[in-house]
Amino acid sequence: MKAYVFPLSPNARKVMAVAAHLDLPLDYQVVDLTKGESRTPEFLKLNPNGKMPVLVDGDFVLWESNAIMQYLASQKPNGLWPDDAQVRADICRWQCWQLSEWMPACGPLLWENLLKAMLQQGSPDGKVVQNAEANFLRTASILDQHLAQRDYLVGDDVTLADLAMAAPLEYAAAAKMPWASHEHLQRWYARIDALPAWQKTKPRMG
Ligand SMILES: N[C@@H](CCC(=O)N[C@@H](CS)C(=O)NCC(=O)O)C(=O)O
């Protein structure tokens, strides 16, 4: 299977971490987003949205990171995606929430406080940052409360839900995400950060 990724991206990390955790050999093709490589005619044939990650397995082409995570985790029995309808629905619920609530909360802070400077796109917009911080605090509190009595988002061990949610937090400090008072969330992230698959796929700058 071939995966098209830009390894610095949290969405790529989600896919790479699953493959690392399950020891699935993926043939990686880097799509350099700083060079517009996701907008070439060849790449747009794989994903008309012009976005990575994309997985190619023979004739089967799959985009959307959460769908790719589930497909990879379906390759063999494992605890990331247990074969139980209710557990899978619970994991999928958190993956949906990750896309609909968590990424929109983290994304503007990643852009304003980190990417803008990296890409020389000017300084952070104070008003956008203020709104983004409020949204981050609202959503982070939901996670913090959920994690107050548990070590992982679903069940007693790491699942796809954790790997999906953890991805943007790699940049929590650099993007100035205000999570200092969310101690349960921080403790949970430290647990994910310690996983060999998370360490192995840590983005390397430069
Ligand atoms: N919902 C998609 C989002 C993917 C996405 O936003 N990818 C971004 C980088 S994080 C991208 O490839 N952007 C390239 C572009 O817009 O040209 C997923 O989860 O896979």
Image (cartoon, grey):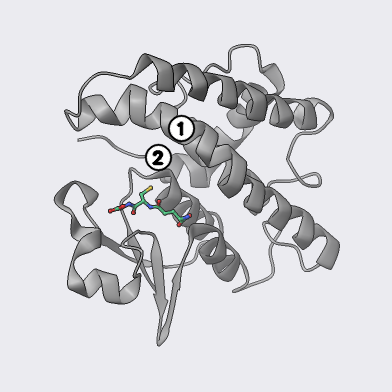
User: Is residue 190 visible to the viewer in this orientation of the structure?
Assistant: yes
Give the class, few, some or many, for how many residues have Cα within 10 Å of label 2's Cα (few <14, many ≥20).
some
- Disc 2 element: loop
- Disc 1 element: helix
**Mark nearer the viewer, 2 or 1:** 1
The spot of residue 93 in percent (x, y) is 72, 53
Quarter of the image with the C terminus in it: top left
Q: What mark, if any, has residue 170 been given in the picture?
A: 1
Give the class, few, some or many, for how many residues have Cα within 10 Å of label 1's Cα (few <14, many ≥20).
some
On the image, which quarter does residue 57 sit in?
Answer: bottom left
User: Label 2: which residue?
Assistant: 202
On the image, which quarter does residue 55 sit in?
Answer: bottom left
**Residue in the picture at 42% in, 22% down:** 128
Mark 2 beta carbon near ligand 1 (under 8 Å): no
- Furthest toward the top, the residue is 181
The spot of residue 84 in percent (x, y) is 82, 66
The spot of residue 201 in percent (x, y) is 41, 46
Q: Is residue 110 left or right of residue 204?
A: right
Quote the CA–CA distance across marks 2 and 1. Answer: 8 Å
Nearest the camera: 126 or 37?
A: 126
